[in-house]
Image (spheres, helix red, strand yellow):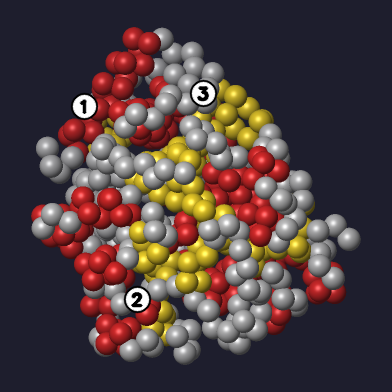
Amino acid sequence: MPRHLLAIDQGTTSTRALLFDEGGTPLASARRELPQHFPRDGWVEHDAGRLFDDACLAVREVLAAAGLAPPDLRAGAVAAVGVTNQRETVVLWERESGRPLHRALVWQDRRTADHCERLRAAGHEARLQEKTGLLLDPYFSATKIAWLLDALPGARARAERGELLCGTVDSWLLWNLRGPRPADGARHLTDATNAARTALFDLRRQRWDDDLLALFSVPRALLPEVLDSAADFGACDPALFGAPLPLRGVAGDQQAAAVGQACFRAGQVKCTYGTGAFLLLAAGERLPVSRHRLLGTVALRLAGAPSYALEGSIFSAGSSIQWLRDGLHLFAQAKDSEALAATADPARRVHLVPAFTGLGAPHWDAAARGAILGLTRDVTAADLTAAALQAVAFQTADLLSAMAADGAPRPAALRVDGGLSENGYAMQFLADVLDLPVERPACVETTALGVALLAGLGAGVFSSTDELAARWRLAARFLPRMAAAERDERLAGWRAAVLRVLSHG
């Protein structure tokens, strides 16, 4: 019987399951839309229970679509399951009942901006960056956890008594997938790539840091055990899918995408264009410390040995297109943006700065808010759509410029994935603005593919990352064709527009 690899991909706007064969070819997929909750300006929440329920529904749909019944599963038709997730988002729940105490606080949530600013003013950011590779920003998990403990009556005392657990979405899914009585006990688990995004994890020592736990007032008892990204995470409760499917791979979505893009060698770079956009440059065995407000992070940990990456985070990419579709009703489907943008006046200079929830790297301005600049009476829906797609490229250029200023070598090409990577207008403009070849793989579901491959590695289906890399296939290459003078003029216009929205001048 052929062995399959199953990925659960829990993202910001949807929860999906994808089934792959051993060669990495997708065989079936299912998707559940995830509602967003915005209780106040800058607050973003998800229903934690729905994250798990939708994951189970999606898995059942995929197994049914592939014709895999419980007897097939018990016979080993699914060799391994991998879990990948929106990073930094946190859930707080009761150890005994598994009941979440609050909606999940999403990575985009900015409610702890003042807390971060107080810590920055007190001089803590340099120490944080040295240990974690991160900066003081509401994006990361630590201040979210502290907010939950302080905002919910009795939560902090219960946490200190060991009655509560907290974790990123992977931990929440693992806790529920393993069921109420897993064979290996009630282990609370995560992997190193997700732990690296909490601002509580020492990247060099690969452990929770007591000084940071004290700084953010987070009790250690809340936090999970940290495993490699390809490891034994237990098995799914047989009651869920009819068999104890082995959980063998876990990684944050961007690290999983880097695996799917075969970015294992130092200097290789990928960017995933989903709700946000995330650029990861493989850095090898040495943790990079950025002088230009980029992030050092764990790219992967295998056999106890971490490899690192330099990362730049863009908060709004596909979400800008979603806003044009759902908020302004400029088109019916996101894919329609490509044809509409192609009709825009190429001489017009309209800039949409998508600071809907602040700006990420390299600015890290939580108080910045979006703007449209260059408006005239003859600006059309096509011009606004083009401006939104161009903003994705401009923000990527800012990240690569910051990486170059940090001493990173110029990459030979940028590998792209995510839903927006299928937009030909956006990818061609990206190649033009970066003056780099942009490569789109045959499988753009690289996040799910990456964690499926990691699960295969954890289950012994594959023996090395070299074997994983051999599965990468190119589908399309976009070559730069914009004149240097136009590129410089457009980038200067973009950077002037960004200066107009920054809250700190």
Residue 289 is tagged as none
Name the amino acid type tagged 1: Ala
Query: Is the C-beta separation of discs 1 and 3 under 8 Å?
Result: no
Q: Mark 3 points at which residue?
A: 412
| Label 1 to label 3: alpha-carbon separation | 28 Å
Would residue 484 appear left or right of 72 to someone viewing this image? left
The residue shown at (81%, 67%) is: 76
The residue shown at (70%, 43%) is: 467
Name the amino acid type tagged 2: Arg
- Ranked by sequence position, the earlier of labels 3 and 2 is 2
Q: Mark 1 points at which residue?
A: 496
Label 2 CA crowd tier, 10 Å (few <14, some 14–19, many 20+)? some
- Vertical position of residue 169 compared to residue 430: above or below: below
Nearest to the observer: residue 347 or residue 224: 224
- Ranked by sequence position, the earlier of labels 1 and 2 is 2
Residue 65 rendering spot, x and y as whole percentages: 77, 61
Quadrant including the C terminus: top left
| Label 1 to label 2: alpha-carbon separation | 45 Å
